Amino acid sequence: MIRRLRRAYGRLRLGTRLALGLGVLALVVFAVVGTALTTYMRDYLSAELDTQLAHAQTAQSKNLVDYGSLQNKKYYGWYYAVYDVSGGTPELRKPEADTDLPEDVEDFTAAARARVDAGEEILRTEWLKGAGLYRLRACEVTPGTVLVSAAPLEEIEDTVTELATIQAVTFGLALLALVVAGRSMLRRGLQPLSDMASTARGITSHDLTDSARLPVRHAARGGGPEVEELRTAFNRMLEHIDESLAVRTEAEQRLRRFVADASHELRTPLMSVRGYADLFQYAAANEPEERDKHLARLRAEAARMGFLLDDLLLLARLDAAEVQTPLRPRETNLVEVVQQAADAFRASHPDHPLTVRPGPATLTARVDPQRIRQVLDNLLTNAAVHTPPGTEVSVAVSARDGTARVRVADAGPGIPAADRERVFDRFYRVDKARSRDRGGSGLGLAVAASLVRAHGGDIGLASEPGATVFTVTLPPAGPPDLTDP
C-alpha cells in the first residue's frame, strides 16, 4: 500500500506535489495550534471553576459556622454535602433531603475520606452516576467537619467542543484555500519550467542535420530569481549548442571542400604521372632517345605530388593538435633565417629583385627555424609566382611591443578586396591576375598561416594596387622596440 502511494505520488506534477506538501505542513501547524488553543481553554475554564468552587465553599463554610445550615440558594446543578469525620469514618450530615444529592454519593464520601487522610483540600474530577462529569472539592469547615462541593463540567466541555468545532471548520476552510491558492501560484511560478520543457521538445523535433541554428529560444520571464537563473542557463546552453553546431557545420563544409579540392589537386599530378609512364614505356620500346626526357618529367610530377602530400599532412597534424607537435622550437635568430630565405629566393627567382630592409643585427625568438623558414619561402614564392617578372620584393625584420615582426612585400598588382579574406583558405586561388596557370596548389599561404598560429603568432595582409604586404607577428623578441622601416 505504501509503495503504491509512493508511486502515485511520484507520478504527480511538481506543482501538485509542492501544493500537497504545503497542505500537509499547514495541517500539522493547524493541528498543533488547535490542540494548544483547546487545551489552554479547557485548563483556563477549569481553573476558573476551581476558583468559583473555592469561593462558594468559603460562603457555605461561613454559613455553617454561623447558622449551622447550608445556604438554600446555590448554582444550578451544584451539590454540597457536609460530613462528620470526627469518628474517623465520614458520615453524611447535610443535606437531609436526598433530592439535593446525586443518586450515588460514594464519590462524595471518598473525597471526604481523602481530605481526612491528606490533611488538605482535595480537588478531583469524577463521573457521578445519574449526573455526569463533575468537579469535586473537599475542605475542612471546623475540626471534624468536612464540606464537599461538586460543580458540573458540562458547560466547560460544551464550550471546548464548540471551540474545537469552530477551529476544525475554520482551519479546514483555510487549509483548502491555502492548497488551492498555493497550487494556482505554483502553477504560475512553474510555468517557465513548462515553457522550457516545450522548448526542449521543440529542439528534439528539429532536424539539426540541415541547419546549425536552433529554431527556438525561451524568452518568457517570471517565476522568481531561481527560475530566471535556470532560464538564463538554459538559453546559454542553447547558444553553446548553436555555436557547436555552427562550428561542426563549418568544419564539415570545409572538410567537403578540402576533400574535393585535394582530390582534384592530386588527380592532376596522378594523371600526369600516368601519362608520362605510358610515354616512357612507349619511348623505351620505340624512341629510346626520348626516354630520359619522359623519365625526368615523370620524376618532376612525382615530386610535385610529394610536396602536395607533405603540405596536406602538415596541415592535418596542425589541425589535430597532436601531442607530438610537428614543431621543434628553440632560441633562433630570425635575422639569420630571413637572410637564408632571401639568398635562396635570389638564386631561384633572379627575375624578381629582392631587398632586405635594414633592421636589428640580432632578433631572438623561440621558434622552429625550419618551419619559420618554410613560412618565409612560401610568402616569397607567392610574391614571385603571382607578380610579373621584374617586380620588386622586400623583406624587413623588426621588434615592436614585445613581439618579433617579419614583413614580406611586393610591388605587384595587389589582391582584390573580395579575395583578401580567403587568401589563407586551403586550395583557394585568386582569379584573374593570380590564376591557376601561373602555378601553385593553393596551399602555400594556408600552410604559412597555420605554422605561424601554431607558434602562437599571427599573420596579416594589407594589399592595394601596387603594394601587397604580409606581416608575420611572433611571440616575444629580445631587442628593444624598433619601428618598421
Image: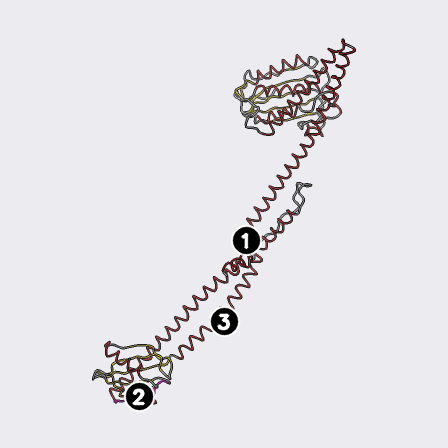
Residue at the far right: name it. Answer: 286
Residue 224 is labelled as: 1
Q: Amino acid at mark 1?
A: Gly
Q: Main secondary structure of the magenta part?
A: loop
The CA distance from mark 3 to mark 1 is: 34 Å
Q: Which residues are magenta?
A: 67-76
Residue 51 is labelled as: none
Picture layout, residue 118 above or below residue 23: below
The CA distance from mark 1 to mark 2 is: 73 Å
* Residue 74 forms part of the magenta stretch: yes
Residue 71 is labelled as: 2
Q: Amino acid at mark 2?
A: Gln
| Mark 2: few/some/many CA within 10 Å (<14, 14-19, 20+) | some
Q: Position of residue 247 (x, y in %)?
A: 63, 36
- Mark 2 or mark 3: name the one nearer the start of the chain: 2
Q: Secondary structure at mark 1?
A: helix
